[in-house]
Amino acid sequence: MAGLTSTGIGSGLDVAGLVSKLVDAERTPVLTRLATKEATLQAQLSGFGLVSGALDKVKSALDALNSPTLLTANKTTVGDDSRFTASADASAAPGSYSVQVSQLATGQKLASGAFSGPDAVVGSGTLTLALGGNSVDISIDDGNDTLAGIRDAINAARDAAGQPLGVTATLVTSTGGTEPAGTYLLLTSSVTGAANTISLAASGGDGGLAALQYQTGGANNGLTERQAPANAVVQVDGFTYASASNTVTGALAGVTLNLKATTAAPVTLTVGADTGAVRGKLQALVDAYNGLHQVIKQQAGYDAAAGKGGVLIGEPALRNLESQLRRALTEPLGGAGPIESAADLGLGFDASGTMTLDGAKLDALLAGDRGAVAGFLQGEQGVIGRLEGVVDGYLGSAGGILKARTDGIDRRLKDIADQRDALAARMDALQQQYLKQFNALDSLLGQLQSTGTFLTQQLASLPGAQSADK
């Protein structure tokens, strides 16, 4: 709004003050009404946002329950998990098994003879390092022909695919014992299994690299074997299985054993249905629904103690939302399975509308027939699909009911902003109108004052005026 011009010079009237008060008298009630309406709409928008957030948690809980592996998952229990751990997929047969770990899989270790130190010159030429069918040629010259230089060259070597070969070189120093004192080159394979042997061939150069060559069973080996490669060996219920890795996948169908140490006696492995995962995810749905129930109660209910309702009280969409979700849960499916309704699964509602879960009833069903539970929850006409249909009808980004409500509020908020702009323009025009009128009045009053002053002066100058005054 334009600033008021300092007027009132002619008559002494405070024209600016009068105009400001008149304009404020017209503007303030409208601004107050718009602000009150805006605050209500903002509160409703926030309320719908809370409902959407709570309903989104219900959707996440439903998505988790709809996992295709949830009701086929197995779990394992190991009597001594310091020896091995285990995991089981859906194909594993429930039962109890005796597992003994006779031997762990190991990688081969080779060691050179003693050298005077890391800086001892070994020789030049080409070392061909091979492991598990992959090989790499390593060039050794006067820039890396020391024991330390060869160690670094081996560790930096990459195969044709640009990957490390799986052999690590390190230097070990001995002060002398059963072996001569000196520095040794130690090669360790990270690939376990009896078939995974290291070979190191020397060619060209000055011949010094022959001190590092090795072939399994070779007659002219410069390196000696410090640890032989070996397979892991386990017995499952007395049946022996050898594995090149300590991760054993073939001994027991559907079960993976992760070996840690050998066992002095058999260890019991139990495979069973992972009922805890199902119960946990159903409890998550219960918690999400109850969270939604509380939000709707706060936003759309009536607080008798406080004597006021929520910002969304009377909103029919929220009453319908709860009733649709509850109906989707409680109505029988009408199928031929042993579970007809959510109540059979242990799901129910108390007098306050809070959802409950009978864990014992659920566990009994899961232990007896996980397939029936899967059919009820996830089947083509399962209760999860029913609930998701309700949720999607409210949360859908295109035609969801909650979005339609919030879009309507956004439009009304924009209309309030437009009304404010229109009011400001109208008040500017009104101010100019008042200023024009009051300035005209001020000018008229100024003229009348000047005329009065002139007449007074003229009357005072008439003959006899002074004596008349006396």
Image (cartoon, rainbow, N blue to C red):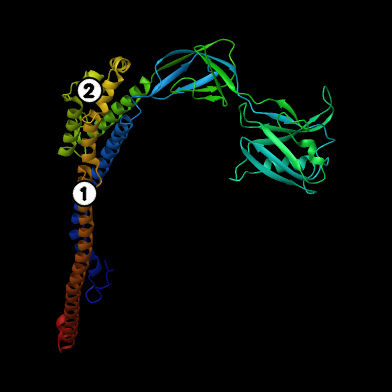
Residue named by callout 2: 342
Q: Amino acid at mark 1?
A: Ile
Res. 311 in view: no
**In front here: 62 or 3?**
62
Residues packed near mark 2 inside 10 Å, few (<14), some (14 to 19) or many (20 plus): some
**Number of dots carrying numbers:** 2
Q: Residue at x 33, y 27 (%)?
A: 284
Label 2 element class: helix
Q: Amino acid at mark 2?
A: Ala
**Mark 1 to mark 2: distance in Å?**
37 Å
**In front here: 177 or 222?**
222
Look at the picture and state if 8 lies above or below 318: below
Look at the picture and state if 38 lies above or below 375: below
Q: Is residue 2 left or right of residue 276?
A: left
Q: Residue at x 63, y 32 (%)?
A: 190
Comparing marks 1 and 2, which lies closer to the viewer? 2
Task: Give residue 196's position: percent from left, percent from top.
Answer: 63, 30
Q: Residue at x 16, y 78 (%)?
A: 444
Task: Give residue 36's position: percent from left, percent from top.
Answer: 21, 49
Sequence-first tag of 1 and 2: 2
Task: Give residue 266's position: percent from left, percent from top.
Answer: 54, 11
Label 1 element class: helix
Return the mark for residue 291: none
Res. 375 in view: yes
Residues packed near mark 1 inside 10 Å, few (<14), some (14 to 19) or many (20 plus): some
Residue named by callout 1: 409
Q: Residue at x 64, y 28 (%)?
A: 107
For the N terminus, give its image quadrant.
bottom left
Task: Give residue 251's position: percent from left, percent from top.
Answer: 49, 20
